[in-house]
Amino acid sequence: MSYEKVLQARKIFIGTKQTVKALKDENVQEILVASDAEPRLTTKLVEEALLMNIPVHYVDSMKKLGKACGIEVGAAAVAIIR
């Protein structure tokens, strides 16, 4: 499952703003987006990733994604770095 990928990743960027920055600056392996996040927050991010041929995977919960990242709040998106 995608949450396990976050736990196993060596380097991640958490949140939509940081994920967009990572797409431009880092070697992103894949993006995880919470399905319950507001589309106005994630649409640009998903479009950018697809243009760069970076896989986008959806998870069901911002809260679970945040927990997998080791934070106590929800996360709308996470970039996993190679």
Image: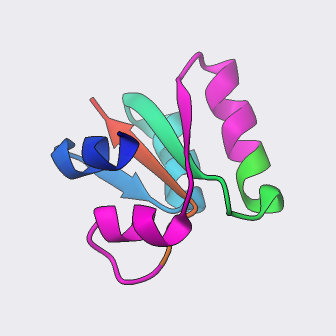
- Residue farthest toward the top in the current orientation of the protein: 53
Q: How is the image coloured?
A: rainbow
Q: Count of labels shown?
A: 0
**Quadrant of residue 34 within the rendered picture:** bottom right
- Residue farthest toward the bottom in the current orientation of the protein: 72
Q: Is residue 62 above or below residue 13?
A: below
- The answer to if 61 sits in the magenta stretch is yes
Q: Residue at x 66, y 53 (%)?
A: 35
Task: Estimate the x, y position of residue 82 in percent, counting from the top left.
Answer: 27, 29
Task: Estimate the x, y position of residue 25 in percent, counting from the top left.
Answer: 45, 38
Q: Residue at x 59, y 16 (%)?
A: 53
Q: Is residue 2 above or below residue 28?
A: below
Q: Is residue 14 left or right of residue 71?
A: right
Magenta stretch, residue numbers: 44-73
Q: Is residue 11 left or right of residue 12?
A: left
Residue closer to the observer: 64 or 18: 64
- The answer to if 26 sits in the magenta stretch is no
Residue closer to the observer: 45 or 1: 1
Location of the N terminus (image quadrant) = top left
Q: Is residue 27 left or right of residue 24?
A: left
Q: Residue at x 21, y 43 (%)?
A: 9
Q: Is residue 17 above or below residue 81?
A: below
Task: Estimate the x, y position of residue 7 in percent, counting from the top left.
Answer: 21, 52
